Image (cartoon, grey):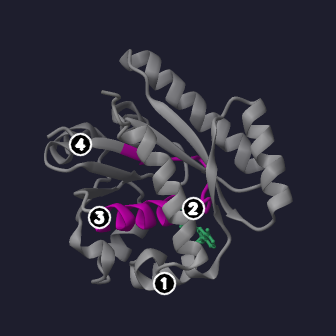
């Protein structure tokens, strides 16, 4: 088995990396995909959530703070999981660069303001450089997170499109359910199935699945 590697990265803290990783991981685990988590953030947000004994706890987790071990760790985990999801620190560091270099897809969470878009573009450039370096195409998509107003999200999305930052159609809206889930080390998919937050995750997962596991025509 050679699993896929999804890396959540952006130089902006608080954009929604850890939340997105936790929620998507829970969603796919429940859809019978074997998911491994890698916490590459010295703040160890994901590691704390994983320790809470809920949805995340049944997944393999490696807290990988030594950047030089990153590639080996990802290779090991991809060997016996369908998907390895890496949660990066909120600042560009070597661990992030190595994880991006090993990624199949990089998900760049962006909040709807100028500084977030600026950081997303920097992360996007790191992905492009990693693609050149490794001589393979590493996909990258931006994801609007913590969206409070549709009009601002539309504006941010059109900016991202103009700047060729490939925004996903799906977005995660600002919802208390996402904050609540962090206290439990879980996700709205489990805590409030069918809720608007759970629907946000479902739509995002569906869009990403087409990129990660494209159906080959027969
Ligand atoms: N879609 C959302 N709606 C509401 N709150 C959110 C959402 N996504 C993240 N948050 C909250 O925003 C804060 C930062 O999110 P987090 O996922 O930890 O970001 P990062 O890992 O990028 O630093 C947390 O308090 C989290 O609960
Ligand atoms: Mg985080």
Tell me residue 146's x, y (percent).
67, 65
Vertical arrangement, residue 67 with respect to residue 151, above or below:
above
**Magenta region, residue range:** 6-31
Label 3 secondary element = helix
Would you say the residues marked 2 and 4 are in contact, meaning their CB atoms lie under 8 Å apart? no
Q: Earlier in the sequence, mark 2 or mark 4?
A: 4
| 88 vs 1: above or below | below
157 vs 152, left or right, is left
Q: Is residue 89 visible?
A: no
From mark 2 to mark 4, how far is it between C-alphas?
24 Å
Residue annotated with mark 1:
192
- CB under 8 Å between discs 3 and 4: no
Q: CA distance from mark 3 to mark 4?
A: 14 Å
Mark 2 Cα-neighbour bin, 10 Å: few <14, some 14–19, many ≥20: many
Give SS at disc 1. loop
Residue 99: x percent and y percent?
37, 40
Q: Alpha carbon of mark 1 to alpha carbon of mark 2: how far?
A: 19 Å
Q: Which residue is mark 3?
A: 29
Mark 1 and mark 4: Cα distance apart in space: 29 Å
Are the residues tagged 1 and 2 within 8 Å (C-beta)?
Answer: no
Checking the image for residue 16, the label placed there is 2
Q: Please report the residue visible at 41 percent of the width from the left and 17 percent of the height from the top.
A: 133
Q: Residue 3: which disc?
A: 4
Give the image location of residue 125, x and y in percent. 59, 28
């Amino acid at each position: 088995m050679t699993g896929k590697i999804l890396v959540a990265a952006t130089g902006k803290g608080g954009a929604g990396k850890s939340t997105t990783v936790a929620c998507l991981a829970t969603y796919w685990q429940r859809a019978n995909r074997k998911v491994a988590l890698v916490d590459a953030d010295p703040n160890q947000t994901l590691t704390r959530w994983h320790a809470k004994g809920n949805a995340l706890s049944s997944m393999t987790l490696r807290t990988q703070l030594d950047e030089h071990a990153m590639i080996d760790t990802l290779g090991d985990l991809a060997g016996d999981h369908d998907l390895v999801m890496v949660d990066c620190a909120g600042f560009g560091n070597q661990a992030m660069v190595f994880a991006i270099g090993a990624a199949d897809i990089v998900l760049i969470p962006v909040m709807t303001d100028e500084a977030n878009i600026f950081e997303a573009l920097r992360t996007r450039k790191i992905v492009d450089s990693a693609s050149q370096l490794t001589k393979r195409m590493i996909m990258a998509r931006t994801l609007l997170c913590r969206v409070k107003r549709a009009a601002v999200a539309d504006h941010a999305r059109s900016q991202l499109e103009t700047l060729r930052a490939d925004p996903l159609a799906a977005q995660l809206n600002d919802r208390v359910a996402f904050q609540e889930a962090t206290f439990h080390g879980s996700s709205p998919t489990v805590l409030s199935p069918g809720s608007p937050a759970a629907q946000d995750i479902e739509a995002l997962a569906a869009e990403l699945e087409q990129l990660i596991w494209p159906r080959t025509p027969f």
